Amino acid sequence: AALLMAVILVLAGNAPAQTRNDIKRAKELADSADKAFRQKEYRQAVDLYGQAIVIVPTNPYCHFWKGYAHYYLKEFDQAERSFVLALNQGFKPVEIYKVRWYIYYEQRNYDAAAADLLKALQLEPKNVVLLKGLGEIYLQQNTNAAALDTFQRALLITPKDGDIYYNIARAHAALGDWSKQAASADEALKKGTQMVGEAYYLLGDAQDKQKNFTGAIDSYQKAISANPSLYQAHRNLANIFQRQNKLSNAIDVLKKAIVLFPNDGNLYTDIS
């Protein structure tokens, strides 16, 4: 609060129309907005920060936190405008980049998202969250070698992070390296990834492509057990059973899948 008051006083120094009472009122509104933000009352926070900005327009602190509240409300256009104002008025750039990249990601503006992440990483090169974000962007852009390199950089910082191994497996899958895909997915599971079903799916996919059908069946079954919404795991598992002429097994898998995905025509074609 003291820092906020100092910022407001400095920035208001060139605005003689603003009285000390105005500045005091702006601080009170910002303090109330901070409280609302902490309580996750983001609509109220937006309104209060906005009132403070009306009184003291050159207020990067309020512009930033107003943008952050818009971000949580998924009002990304408003958030982006607030962040631009905060950045232009001297708010700490890295804090803006850390949030704004995700807005661009949600808008599928991957070039802008990557640009913000790269700027942030210049300032915080060992920030694993930023590295994971950049790796994800590269996967979306199909620059898979860059994605792999980025995730491996993150792994050097947190070598026991199972989620990073999962993402490395995704990168190897995109690059068509099935052996490393399997090894990375297996390591992700050993390291306790949160993406259990997805990691088993990647393991099964790699085993399937390497003709390790026993391993693939087991992995696909575990993938479905952990996350039944993994559509392709059902179809791949049924396909293996069909190739092995275990038609009753294949039909059983597909019947269960149809319950989960009743409007998917491919499953009805498969079962026929």
Image (cartoon, helix red, strand yellow):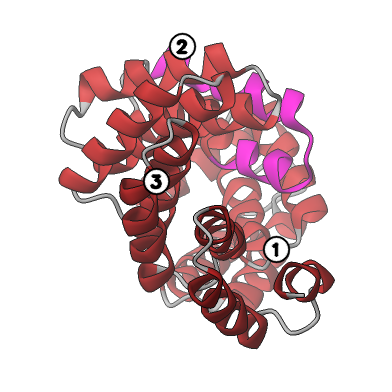
Please tell me how crowded label 3 is: few (under 14), some (14-19), or many (20+) other residues with Cα within 10 Å: some
Residue positioned 61% across, 64% down in the render: 231
Q: Find disc 2 in the rendering and name its residue.
A: 122
Mark 3 or 2: the one toward you: 3
Residue 156 position by quadrant: top left
For mark 1, does the 10 Å Cα neighbourhood hold few (<14), some (14 to 19), or many (20 or more) residues?
A: few
Upstream in the sequence, badge 3 or badge 2?
Answer: 2
Q: Is residue 122 found inside the magenta-colored segment of the image?
A: yes
Residue tagged 3: 213
Q: Nearer the viewer, residue 270 or 189?
A: 270
Q: Secondary structure at mark 3?
A: helix
> Sequence order check: which comes first, mark 2 or mark 1?
1
Q: Main secondary structure of the magenta part?
A: helix
Q: Nearer the viewer, residue 61 or 10?
A: 61
> Could you say which is closer to the camera, residue 134 or residue 115?
134
**Residue 29 vs residue 58: left or right?**
left
Q: Determine whether the residue tagged by mark 1 lies in a helix, strand or loop.
A: loop
Q: Please tell me which residue is depicted at 20% across the width and 29% down the height of the picture.
A: 158
Q: Amino acid at mark 3?
A: Phe
Q: Position of residue 177 (x, y in %)?
A: 47, 19
Q: Residue 213: x and y, percent?
A: 39, 46
Q: Which span is picked out in magenta?
A: 99-124
Q: Residue furthest bottom?
A: 259
Pointer 1: what residue? 74
In the rendering, at what x and y percent does residue 92 appear? 51, 29
Residue 168, quarter of picture: top left
Q: CA distance from mark 3 to mark 2?
A: 45 Å
Ranked by sequence position, the earlier of labels 1 and 3 is 1
Seen from this angle, which residue lies furthest front?
A: 245
* Marking on residue 242: none
| Residue 119 seen from this side | no
